[in-house]
Image (cartoon, helix red, strand yellow):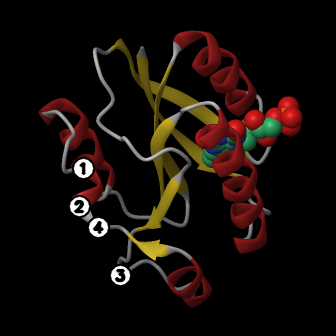
Amino acid sequence: MRRIIYISTAGEELDISDIKEIVRVAAMFNNENRIGGHLLYNGLNFLQVLEGEKQVLDPLYMRIVHDDRHCAVSTILNEDIEQRCFTNWGLGVSHKYGPAQTDTSLESEIAKYEPEVLADAPGHVRRIFEYFITLKA
Ligand SMILES: Cc1cc2nc3c(=O)[nH]c(=O)nc-3n(C[C@H](O)[C@H](O)[C@H](O)COP(=O)(O)O)c2cc1C
């Protein structure tokens, strides 16, 4: 099994309805293909962790990298794992509240980031999330 974490920059035109569409399609695919993970959005950047069988995850990641709803996709981590730490299938999505965040529609439409999503995550994964939430959008 593999775990991939990347950071990307949302497309300039991206709005809440685009994010909801990404999550709708992703939740369905990930659920059917036993991909676990979490997507975090801060109004500018995405951080996503994906875990699953390599033969499903690699082609999915290629589709994500080439998706024009975001750009500058940078792989932070790509490692073999014994077991998943994000055991919920589908795609959790959350949004970091911050002083720079002025788009209140996000706050009502996307769940606030809760560190509990990392409850089973190893230290290095936790640190990547903790770093991301310090970034200002
Ligand atoms: C930030 C971001 C995260 C995404 N995460 C997933 C995901 O976890 N699972 C998924 O199936 N698609 C995800 N997608 C959508 C894929 O890029 C792609 O649209 C989807 O796999 C359908 O592929 P297709 O358009 O070639 O049929 C994501 C897209 C973006 C922009």
Q: How many marks are shown on the rendered structure?
A: 4
Specify whether 111 is left or right of 84: right
Distance between the alpha carbons at the discs numbered 4 and 3: 17 Å
Secondary structure category for the residue under label 2 = helix
Residue at the spot of label 1: 118
Q: Is residue 79 left or right of residue 94?
A: left
Q: Are marks 2 and 1 in contact (CB under 8 Å)?
A: yes
Choose the circle earlier in sequence order: 4 or 3: 3
Which marked residue is nearer to the observer: mark 4 or mark 3? 4
Contact flag, marks 4 and 2 (Cβ < 8 Å): yes
Residue 99, numbered circle: 3
Q: CA distance from mark 4 to mark 2?
A: 4 Å
Q: Work out whether mark 1 precedes mark 3 in sequence or the reverse, and give the earlier one.
A: 3
Q: Earlier in the sequence, mark 3 or mark 2?
A: 3
State yes or no: discs 1 and 3 in contact (Cβ < 8 Å): no
Identify which residue is drawn at 80% across, 63% down. 13
Quadrant position of ligand 1: top right
Give the residue number, with chain letter if any, for mark 4.
114
Q: Hey, what amino acid is under mark 1?
A: Leu
Which numbered disc covers residue 27? Answer: none
Q: Which of the 4 image quarters holds residue 62? A: top right
Q: Position of residue 81 (x, y in %)?
A: 31, 15
Give the left or right position of residue 126, taking residue 17 as reference: left
Label 1 vs label 3: CA separation?
Answer: 23 Å
Name the amino acid type tagged 4. Glu
Instruction: Judge whether residue 48 can be spotted in this image.
Output: no
